[in-house]
Image: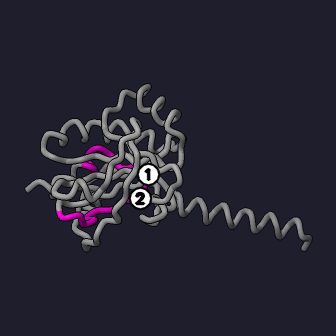
Amino acid sequence: MRKSTWLLIGAVIGFVLLSLYVTKNYSIKTDAAASASANTEAKAAKEPAVDFTLKDLDGKEVTLSGLKGKPVYINFWATWCKWCDKEMPALEKVYQDYKDKGLVVLSVDVGEERGEVAKYISEKQYHFPVVLDSDKSVTYAYGIKSIPVSILVNESGDVVFRRVGHMTEEEMRTAIDPLFP
C-alpha cells in the first residue's frame, strides 16, 4: 500500500479513538442512573485538597486553605469551552441556592486574561466568585487535562467528589447535598 493510504488509515483510527474518549468524558446524563452515579462519586475516598492562592477578578487573593471549615465547590472552566458555557447557568442557580447555607463556589478560569473573563461573567450576569489560574499551575496541580471539571471539598479540606465533564443542575445538587446533613 502507498504511504498516503496508511496515513489516512492512521488518521481515521485516531479520530475514532478521540471520539470515543470525548463521548465517554462529555456525555450529558439526565436520568436517574446519572444521579446515582454522581452520588456514588461523592462518596469516593477522601484525599486532601491541594491548597492554592489565586486572584479574583478584582485582584484580591483567595486561598483555598483560608476557606477551611466551609464546603467548597471548585469548578474549572474557560470562556471558549462550549460544555462549560452550558454548565454555567446551573452553577449560578446552585450558587444562589446554597450560598446562604455556607457553600463557597470557586469558579477557576483556566489560562485566560482577566479582561476576557470579566467581560464574559458580566455579559452572562453570573454572580459566583471567579478566580484566575492564568499560568494553569492549579489546573496542573489537580491533574486536570480537560474541562469542565467539578471538585467538592468538605469542611475538613478533603476532596470528596470529582467529576470530569458537564454537570446538570440536578447532578450538582446530588453531589452537594451530602455536605449538608
Residue lying at the far front of the rendered structure = 60
The percent coordinates of residue 41 (x first, y second) are 28, 65
**What numbered label is drawn on residue 164?**
2
The residue nearer to you, when weighing 72 against 15, is 72
Give me the residue at 25% from left, 55% from top.
66
Label 1, label 2: how far apart the Cα atoms are: 6 Å
Q: Secondary structure at mark 2?
A: strand
Number of marks in the image? 2
Is 70 positioned to the left or the right of 172 in the image? left
Question: Please, what is the three-letter code of the amino acid marked with disc 2?
Answer: Val
Q: Is residue 22 above or below residue 6?
A: above
Give me the residue at 11% from left, 54% from top.
180
> How dense is the environment of label 1, judged by Cα within 10 Å: few (below 14), some, or many (20 and up)?
many
Q: Is residue 76 above or below residue 158?
A: above
Residue 58 in magenta stretch: no
Q: Is residue 34 above or below residue 56?
A: below
Give the quadrant of the C terminus.
bottom left
Q: Which range of residues does the magenta coloring cover?
A: 156-172
Give me the residue at 36% from left, 47% from top.
61
Q: Secondary structure at mark 1?
A: loop
Q: Which residue is mark 1?
A: 148
